[in-house]
Amino acid sequence: MAMLSLQNVVKRFGDNTVCDGIDLDVEEGQMVCLIGASGAGKSTLLRCINLLEPIEDGAIYLGGEDISIPGLDPQPVRKRIGIVFQSYNLFPHMTALENAMLAPRRVYGQSREVLRPQIEELFDKFGLADRMHHYPDQLSGGQQQRVAIVRALAMKPDVMLFDEITAALDPQLVGEVLAVLHLLKASGMTMVLATHEMDFAREAADKVCFLKDGHIIEEGPPEVVFEAPTKAETREFLARVL
Ligand SMILES: Nc1ncnc2c1ncn2[C@@H]1O[C@H](COP(=O)(O)OP(=O)(O)OP(=O)(O)O)[C@@H](O)[C@H]1O
Ligand SMILES: [Mg+2]
């Protein structure tokens, strides 16, 4: 059974159909990369998975459970699906550590004493051990984005979604954030990424999905999608971006 399964997901904004019957399976521990031109529907699809947007048709299953039933309380689902965006949105008046402890303290009622060693371990793992007590404006963009990832992981999600998390970073800071994704993959996390980092998708993804106009035009292992795409639309897109 797939960890995450989308079946015929349809999302419209007015008469604009932004996801037009998306089928996608993500197995446990897989990293799936969504690629495609601006406006293809990548962000919207991630927002639908996290129940930030209601869907018009189809279904989304998490661990076999239908999470798209109308009227379902989204909060328990969002604990199980973490999402990180391009903008880190850390609270400026809290240190990195306090930012990361806030949600599990509020949502799970866990004490600082219980949380702290677990979260310190994450900071350590992602090269932030000496930055835990800094405030966001004392951190580089790459450090802030890594703190945002730690903050999402502190909830112990089953699945992580990443939406262009390196897009706002200076080029020299992109690598340190991509390194965190490599570590997460090695730890067995199930992940879906929208990304314009084609080199990263090529080397790290288990599966690449090329989206256009709300459709998955082509999907497969990166060596097929990048090296031997079967669809003309995929070839045109890759010729533009590579
Ligand atoms: N809240 C909204 N209301 C109306 N239309 C929206 C909304 N959010 C997205 N759209 C539209 O949905 C389409 C897909 O947008 P989306 O942001 O999902 O694309 P994307 O593939 O993530 O693009 P990019 O690579 O630029 O991030 C676009 O036509 C966009 O204008
Ligand atoms: Mg987007």
Image: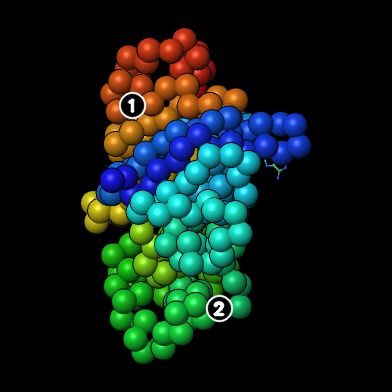
Picture disc at residue 45:
none
Say which quarter of the image contains residue 111: bottom left
Q: Residue furthest top?
A: 232
Instruction: Look at the picture and state if 190 lies above or below 91.
Output: above
- Say whether residue 132 is left or right of residue 203: right
* Amino acid type of the residue tagged 2 in the rendering: Met
**Circle 1 is placed at which residue position?**
220
Q: How many marks?
A: 2
Task: Give x and y (percent) for residue 112.
Answer: 41, 87
Instruction: Look at the picture and state if 142 lies above or below 228.
Output: below
Q: CA distance from mark 1 to mark 2?
A: 42 Å
User: Mark 2 falls on what kind of element?
Assistant: loop
Instruction: Look at the picture and state if 128 lies above or below 161.
Output: below
Task: Give x and y (percent) for residue 140.
Answer: 50, 60
User: Mark 1 falls on what kind of element?
Assistant: strand
- Say whether residue 37 is left or right of residue 235: right
| Quarter, ligand 1 | top right
Task: Give x and y (percent) for residue 6.
Answer: 45, 40
Residue sitting at x 56%, y 48%: 47
Between 171 and 154, the one lying in front of the other is 154
Visible residue check, residue 36: no
Between 6 and 143, the one lying in front of the other is 6
* Amino acid type of the residue tagged 1 in the rendering: Gly
- Say whether residue 124 is left or right of residue 139: left
Residue sitting at x 53%, y 26%: 215
**Circle 2 is placed at which residue position?**
94
Residue sitting at x 33%, y 68%: 122
Q: Nearer the viewer, mark 1 or mark 2?
A: 1
Between 12 and 160, the one lying in front of the other is 12
**Which quadrant is home to the C terminus?**
top left
